[in-house]
Image: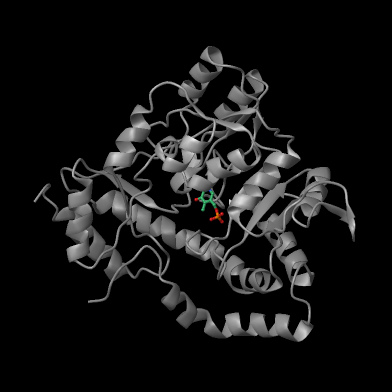
Amino acid sequence: MSSIGLADFKAMWATHRQAFLDAADRVGKSGWLVLGSEVESFERELAAYWRLPFAVGVASGLDALEIAFRCEGMKPGDRVLTTPLSAFATTLAIVRVGAIPVFVDVDESGLMDLGAAERAVSSGPVPKFVVPVHLFGHAMNLASLSDFAGRHQLTVIEDCAQAIGAKSNGQPVGTASRVCATSFYPTKNLGALGDGGALLTSDETIAKHARSLRDYGQSEKYLHVEMGLNSRLDELQAALLRSVQLPMLGAQTERRLAIADRYLRELNADIVRCLPVPGSSQSVWHLFPVTTPSRDALKAHLKKADIHAAVHYPTLIPDQPAMKQVVHEVSGKLTNANRLATNELSLPIHPWLSDDDVSRVIAAVNSFEGQS
Ligand SMILES: *Cc1c(COP(=O)(O)O)cnc(C)c1O
């Protein structure tokens, strides 16, 4: 019996080895290794996939967020509504700009609760930005998000690192913002064989600004108009992404949906619940979160069957030790977020799982009877 994990990079390599090697060979032969035709082509193809005019490749999802924030004029001291339940990078990018994260609770799906955000706006100092996360591959309700942001003159920047291809009532995630950010960290739905990220935008000025910021803030070679980053996407990663990973993304997303569908229909343990999906979301199931009061026992139970589940996330961002060093605010009680930090477990849902693997996960979860 083989081990079932949250990703399977060996299966990915075994299946696509030759295509990866061909792409690498193309880059090697070209003699051009950073910011060249592979990055340009990948940006065009990714933008087409997303049905937006511009994509800008960068070194990571974290950098994509920071650059997006700077393109939208986020400044030191600005208040930014965001979620306590995310990868740490969402907050880290806000802090790197010098802005102040203001954490509001999530709803029962784990996405930013706009009711809590509304209370934060009416009770605290006025924020300028809202940075929601389309967590687990679920799309937040974009119409509600735009309405909320519009009423309070907040600039929206969506973190789409877990939700490439997800839609809210047919509208792609990322389009409630002028610029959004995504990640190509290997475990993400569109993963590189290393680090990478991108900004997506319909605004040519923002795209141009982002291209300058990722490359030391140059407006032309050796002319530095502002303090930028070194956040360039390698030709090699761009080539692997565009030749192998991006063309497969549609089929792999379908596979994730089919697995999620089986989990939703067949999981039936009394004390394990699937997290509710927002009714407006066409999800891409980056993760498959369940909740149970005996989370650690369920994780151990699965491990005995050689199934490796993971917690997203065990510690809320404002409770991280590093947050003691920076100015931040918590608005209201983080009741739902705290409950998820205690109860949530993510089941394997990657596209390399066979039908038998999925059956094994279902059988293992269904045989769980609680604290042992
Ligand atoms: C992965 C992730 C990021 C950061 O991406 P990196 O490429 O690892 O820097 C940001 N936000 C969310 C929600 C993520 O899942």
- Compared to residue 265, the image places residue 76 above or below, namely above
Of residues 286 and 268, which is closer to you in this image? 286
- Compared to residue 291, the image places residue 126 above or below, namely above
Describe residue 247's horizontal placement relative to residue 110 as left or right.
Answer: right
State how the image is colored: one colour
Q: In which quarter of the image is the N terminus?
A: bottom left
Res. 68 in view:
yes
Which residue corresponds to the image point at 64% horizontal and 36% vertical from the top-left?
98
Which residue corresponds to the image point at 42% horizontal and 59% vertical from the top-left?
256
Of residues 48 and 149, which is closer to you in this image? 149
- Compared to residue 266, the image places residue 196 above or below, namely below
Res. 280 in view:
no
Measuring from the top left, give residue 55's x and y in whole percent: 72, 54
Of residues 18 and 372, which is closer to you in this image? 372
Describe residue 53's horizontal placement relative to residue 92 as left or right.
Answer: right
The quadrant holding residue 230 is bottom right
- Compared to residue 360, the image places residue 243 above or below, namely below
Measuring from the top left, give residue 288's x and y in whole percent: 36, 51
Please identify the residue farthest to the front as the structure is shown.
325
Measuring from the top left, give residue 342's x and y in whole percent: 28, 40
The quadrant holding residue 173 is top right
Please identify the residue farthest to the left as the structure is shown.
372
